[in-house]
Image (cartoon, rainbow, N blue to C red):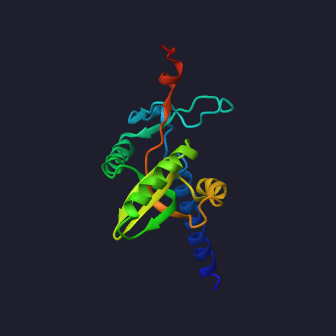
Amino acid sequence: MSFECPQVMKRISLTYFILILIFSLSAFAQTPPENNPSTIKVEEVKLFKSTAYSGNVEINQAGEIAKLVGVHMFILKKQKGFEGYRIRIFAKTGAGARTEADDLRVNFRETHEDITPYLHYNTPNWEIHVGNYRTRVEAMEVFDMIKEDYPQAFIIKSIIEFPVLETQSEETEAPE
């Protein structure tokens, strides 16, 4: 037994030394983004219209990520939007359903100028969907406002339109 204990202790010590060496080397494996030549600068985009948010955001990313984002944006543009939420306020089948849906859409546009109504034909129903909301919470705020006028309304998942984003160059241009 006395011969094995020093050998076991040497093996354990050697194992710990190798593990510590591996972990310490991995801490120096990353280089800061400013030293990485494959990073690109993305144009600043203002996401909020409020003046309460200020400052500059600089995003540095590898070229491969920019390519993947480009492919993703191509796919989204091809489908004319991305997944979000709308509120369905009307659905009906029958001979006069389209006329009734058109009348309701015009009436909704007059009473709610800031919310866009959309006419859809989902066989066999004519439907009116309103709004473009990225989250269910955003849709719930509007739903609470219109549920008295449209008691049959409910929130649905849908492909919504891209929001209009203002870039920094659009903000600094003088009005004509």
- Look at the image and tell me whether residue 161 can be seen: yes
Q: Is residue 106 left or right of residue 124?
A: right
Is 171 or 68 nearer to us in this picture?
171
Is 65 or 168 nearer to us in this picture?
168
- Look at the image and tell me whether residue 112 can be seen: no
Q: Is residue 42 left or right of residue 122?
A: right
Q: Quadrant of the N terminus?
A: bottom right
Give the residue furthest to the front.
Answer: 96
Q: Name the residue rendered at 33%, 52% in the picture.
A: 79
Above or below 105: residue 2: below
Q: Position of residue 117 (x, y in %)?
A: 47, 50
Q: Position of residue 153 (x, y in %)?
A: 56, 64
Above or below 170: residue 114: below
Q: Position of residue 151 (x, y in %)?
A: 61, 65
Q: Is residue 114 left or right of residue 68?
A: right
Is 121 or 73 nearer to us in this picture?
121
